[in-house]
Image: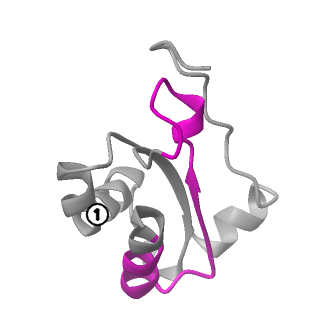
């Protein structure tokens, strides 16, 4: 399962204090059961002192194989534990699909 692979890779790389990997494929115009659109929320001390673009690049690098293959879209939300607390442990909702989603 792609979702499990994503979770495993992010856990191994970032040792997160919080990790949420959501398969949002059902929000898009894809066959039922697809694993092509994901949202990841990663909270980790490893992001301390890093800009958002650097954090996203790290996630993209870790998931390069999945992004080169079955994963069509990846929404990335990265936080330090302090930022996550400040955000009340909430990430933004994903927007509705503009390409004919449900």
Q: Quadrant of the N terminus?
A: bottom left
Q: Quadrant of the C terminus?
A: top right
Relative to residue 72, is residue 69 depicted above or below?
below
Asked if the magenta segment contains residue 51, the reply would be: no
Asked if the magenta segment contains residue 13, the reply would be: yes
Q: Is residue 43 left or right of residue 14?
A: right
Please tell me how crowded label 1 is: few (under 14), some (14-19), or many (20+) other residues with Cα within 10 Å.
Answer: some
Residue farthest to the right, as pictured:
88
Q: In this view, does 40 lie to the left or right of 13?
A: right
- Front-most of residues 26 and 37: 26
Relative to residue 70, is residue 6 depicted above or below?
below
The stretch of residues the image draws in magenta is 7-33
Give the tally of numbered discs: 1
Q: Is residue 37 left or right of residue 13?
A: right
Q: Which colour scheme is used?
A: one colour
Name the secondary structure under disc 1.
Answer: loop
- Front-most of residues 11 and 72: 72
What residue do we see at 37% from left, 61% from top? Answer: 55
Q: Is residue 99 left or right of residue 56?
A: right
Corner quadrant of residue 73: top left
Relative to residue 2, is residue 10 depicted above or below?
below
Q: Name the residue under label 1.
A: 63
Image position, residue 44 (x, y; %): 53, 77
Residue farthest to the front, as pictured:
32
What residue do we see at 44% from left, 49% from top? Answer: 35
What residue do we see at 32% from left, 48% from top? Answer: 71
- Front-most of residues 29 and 94: 29
Image position, residue 93 (x, y; %): 68, 37
Relative to residue 18, is residue 64 depicted above or below?
above
Image position, residue 97 (x, y; %): 54, 21
């Amino acid at each position: 399962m792609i979702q499990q692979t994503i979770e495993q890779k992010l856990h191994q790389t970032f040792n997160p204090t919080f990790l949420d990997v959501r398969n949002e494929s059902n929000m898009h115009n894809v066959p039922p059961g697809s694993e092509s659109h994901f949202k990841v929320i990663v909270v980790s001390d490893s992001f301390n002192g890093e800009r958002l673009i650097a954090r996203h690049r790290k996630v993209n690098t870790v998931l390069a194989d999945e992004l080169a293959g079955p994963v069509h879209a990846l929404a990335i939300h990265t936080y330090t534990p302090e930022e996550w607390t400040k955000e009340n442990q909430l990430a933004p909702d994903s927007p509705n699909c503009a390409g004919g989603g449900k």
